[in-house]
Image (spheres, rainbow, N blue to C red):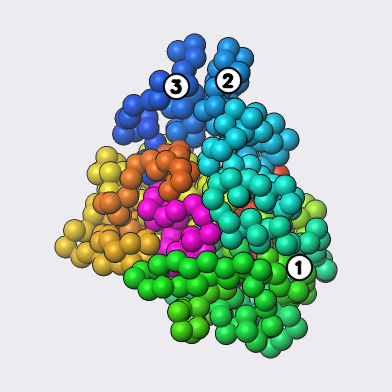
Amino acid sequence: MADQREWNRRSLLRSAAAMAGVAVAVPMLGGTASASAQTGGNDADALFRAGKFEQAARAYEAILKNDPTSLDAARQRGYIALLSNTFPDSEKYLSMALALAPADAQTNSLLADCYIRQDKYALSVPCWQAAGEDAYAKWFAALPGNTYQINGDLGTLPIQQMDPDPLVEVSINGGPAKRLNFYTGAPNLTVSGSVAKEAGLSAISSEQIDFEGETIWIYYGILDSIALGGLELHNVPVGWSTTESGADVSTDNDGLIGTWVFYHLLATFDYAGGSLILRPPTSNAARYQRAGTKPLPLYLAMDHYLQSIGSFAGSGPRLVGVNLGGSGDFTAGMPGAAATQLGIRTDYDRPIGTFGHSHATTTYPCYPSEIRIGDAIANDIYCEMDPNAQVNVAWPYGPGFDLIGHFDHCFWKPYTVTLDFTGMNVYIARGKAS
């Protein structure tokens, strides 16, 4: 779960193996508010943690009106704008925060993310350097201005394998078909070390990390092309990894398509119909939904984690994680504190030992009476509870706001889900894509 996962390029490997994290809303479990951001009886930080972003934004603005030197208020106001891809406001307030504290790592990381979402890579470089992300800085400094260039109007990729990981076939640099997983809990496009060698990729930057007790090398470069059905992307930032000996880290698939690719497109995950459907982002998302399908808000945090509004076991509307793809045999996950507070039946007699949370941990099956996101519902369904997951995980290990739970791969099988990063909405419809 993301509560124990760093927000940086190291999550490239970890995200492929683990589902995104969860936490619980402050109004449910309580908690103390920061004294640094209070105004008029409203605690801006508490509003932010509870996912009341519009109210929190106004509260932070009120703080800045009274105290233009408040780093916390400026940074948080810029972060809120970034969650909804409101780039002018995000740049305005994060630049204000940066002027107050030029070396602040969190501000630099948020502003760098704001720039790369807009493909303004050169502007992100000094921010990555200030944040201590040298490999990222070198990578983004070398990227051309025409990344993610789209050729074609429609790419349909049949899902070749649904479980345990959904796999689709793509072509890398015009080569033979490769089987890639897709996962919105991971950032950029990645390929295996052997595929990178076959495709003739050259590393722009690299770094060494320790992953589950093994030394891993991560490399960053740029891919000439990836064919996604009838749609093709050119000049795509790509990563790959090898062991110390140069062997592939995993042989389960040939790579993974992450959120950075999807937010350059209008992406439809047709679970019910067994396909991944990709269109240019200028397409009208609502046009591809059934009549009566209401959009839900879409938030993008920490450069690749998706959230919307849902509920667990009668919790009422809360922020929830939206994980599409990846792997796993449960429908949703939540922290132990949430399961206890909501009275969710948990089977402590069947512990699950896993390394799928970037650290060795033990989770347990749990069975909420209902989980819901929009009109998508499951009752008394198999979920996962992590007793070690934190209620709220602060930067740099988490998004800093509360999440009641997260919806995972198995939950979506009866549905079609469309992610619209232009309007920042998610559409969920039962049945196959029309």
Residue 101 falls inside the magenta stretch: no
Q: Amino acid at mark 2?
A: Thr
Seen at 46% across and 27% down, the residue is 45
Which residue corresponds to mark 1? 235
Seen from the viewer's position, the closer of residues 57 and 330 is: 57
Q: Position of residue 225 (x, y in %)?
A: 75, 74
Give the mark nearer the N terminus: 1 vs 3: 3
Seen from the viewer's position, the closer of residues 293 and 180 is: 180
Q: Amino acid at mark 3?
A: Ser
How far apart are the alpha carbons under marks 3 and 2?
A: 12 Å
Residue 57 in view in this figure: yes
Q: Which residues are magenta?
A: 1-22
Tell me: residue 406, above or below residue 24. below
> Toward which corner of the image does residue 137 lie, by quadrant?
bottom right
Seen at 37% across and 65% down, the residue is 356
Q: Position of residue 298 (x, y in %)?
A: 60, 45
Q: Secondary structure at mark 1?
A: strand
Give the mark nearer the N terminus: 2 vs 1: 2
Seen at 54% across and 37% down, the residue is 104
Q: Secondary structure at mark 2?
A: loop
Tell me: residue 63, above or below residue 203. above
Say the numbered circle drawn on residue 36: 3
How far apart are the alpha carbons under marks 2 and 1?
A: 41 Å
Which residue corresponds to mark 2? 69
Q: Position of residue 277 (x, y in %)?
A: 68, 67
Quarter placement of the N terminus: bottom left
